[in-house]
Amino acid sequence: MEFIKYGEFTQTYTRQTIVPLRPNLNGYSVRNVGTSVAIVNNKRLLPRPFAGVSGESFSMGGNLGELYEGIIEIKFEAGGGDAIEVTQKFYIPGGSVPEKE
């Protein structure tokens, strides 16, 4: 059995944007860490109910070997306190590793 190496990259966005996608992107997750409603790819994510707790989140995961083709578009409803955390999972080119015995 061989394993495929992957990495992850997390960044917080506080303005409306289209997130630059990592090469060989397999999937991503988003989490509303702000105090206003965030909209990611037309999905509304409610804010955290109080300090120390995250708001709503969702993920878009690919199966083994699949690559994501699309965008991650972030918007915010009026309110200030905008913050959305995006984690991208991507394959590392040439990163397959044989199983250790």
Image: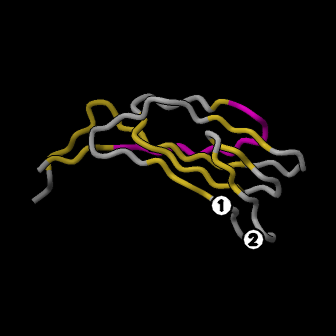
Residue 65 location in percent, x, y? 27, 39
What is the number of callouts on the image? 2
- The answer to whether residue 10 is left or right of residue 53 is left
Q: Which quarter of the rendering shows the C terminus?
A: bottom left
Tag 1: amino acid: Glu
Locate residue 89 relative to residue 65 in the image: left or right. Answer: right
In the picture, measured across the screen, residue 58 lies left or right of residue 62, that is right
Q: Is residue 12 magenta?
A: yes
How busy is the neighbourhood of tag 1: few (under 14 within 10 Å), some, or many (20 plus)? some
Residue 19 numbered tag: none
Q: Nearer the viewer, residue 63 or 24?
A: 63
Q: Secondary structure at mark 2?
A: loop
Residue positioned 62% across, 32% down in the render = 19
Residue receiving disc 2: 52
Q: Residue 56 bears which disc, if any? A: 1
Q: CA distance from mark 1 to mark 2?
A: 13 Å
**Would you place residue 44 above or below residue 26 in this image?**
below
Secondary structure, magenta segment, majority class: strand
Q: Nearer the viewer, residue 21 or 69?
A: 69
Q: Is 35 part of what is drawn in magenta? A: no
Q: Which residues are magenta?
A: 6-17
Secondary element at image label 1: loop
Q: Position of residue 10 (x, y in %)?
A: 58, 46
Other residues around mark 2 within 10 Å, as few (<14) / some (14–19) / many (≥20): few
Residue drawn at x 63%, y 55% is 31
> What's the residue at 71%, 31% (across, down)?
17
Q: Quadrant of residue 95?
A: top left
Expressed as whole percent of the image width and height from the top left, the position of residue 64 reads: 27, 45
